[in-house]
Image: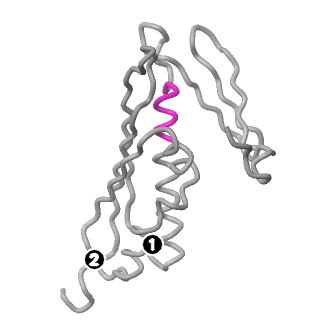
Amino acid sequence: MADPPASATEPVHSVRLELTGGYAFLARFPGIDATWTLDEPTPLGASTGPNASQALATATAHCLSASLLFCLRRGGIEPRGLVAEARAFTGRTEEHRLRVVRIEVTLRLEVAPDADPVRLRRCREVFENYCVVTGAVRTGIPVEVRLDSPPPEPPGSA
């Protein structure tokens, strides 16, 4: 494995997990007043929170959503709505170990009819390239992204 770039030698984000019982963990994020319970599904765990595969899908969908939102807002487009849905698919390796083998993310974007079509098209073309999680995950897991939004109507067509 290649050495990480010099800028990647110090952690930027961290999380602390504490076992709370069974397979459940309480995640704490330093500097953020928020916690998250993670657990395995039944029968192994008690399904008191998302499991690691769901957390990975959540991180991927959130990162893509934030990246798209940043691009849109930078281009002067304020979405009327944005909903993301992610699905993580698991499969077995040659050694019969369970792995996340694919993630599908669907983003449903609603913009005003008068949104600048050139800026909207540019965001559609580039937003995935700026998602740090998706970029990292894609090195080992295929991530398929679909952006659903009706095209804006040309000005004066209403």
Label 1: few (<14), some (14–19) or many (≥20) C-alpha neighbours in 10 Å: some
Pinpoint residue 50: horizontal percent, then vertical percent. Answer: 49, 27
- Image point 74% across, 43% down: which residue? 3
- Image point 50% across, 39% down: which residue? 140
Location of residue 109 (image quadrant): bottom left
- Image point 41% across, 42% down: which residue? 142
- Image point 78% across, 54% down: which residue? 7
Residue type beneath disc 1: Glu
Q: Is residue 94 left or right of residue 70?
A: left
Dominant SS in magenta: helix
Q: Earlier in the sequence, mark 1 or mark 2?
A: 1
Q: Is residue 31 left or right of residue 144?
A: right
The colour mode here is: one colour
Which dot, 1 or 2, sits closer to the camera?
A: 2
Residue 88 in the magenta stretch? The answer is no
Q: Is residue 17 left or right of residue 151?
A: right
**Up/down of 62 relative to 55, above or below:** below
Location of residue 81 (image quadrant): bottom left
Q: Secondary structure at mark 2?
A: loop
**Up/down of 64 relative to 124, above or below:** above
Pinpoint residue 74: horizontal percent, then vertical percent. Answer: 54, 75
Label 2: which residue? 152
**Can you say which quadrant of the picture contains the N terminus?**
top right
Residue type beneath disc 2: Pro
Which contiguous range is marked in magenta? 50-58
Q: Secondary structure at mark 1?
A: loop
Marker count (numbered): 2
Alpha carbon of mark 1 to alpha carbon of mark 2: how far?
13 Å
Circle number at residue 78? 1
Task: Identify which residue, 63 or 24, lies in the foreground.
Answer: 63
**Up/down of 57 relative to 72, above or below:** above
Residue 54 in the magenta stretch? The answer is yes
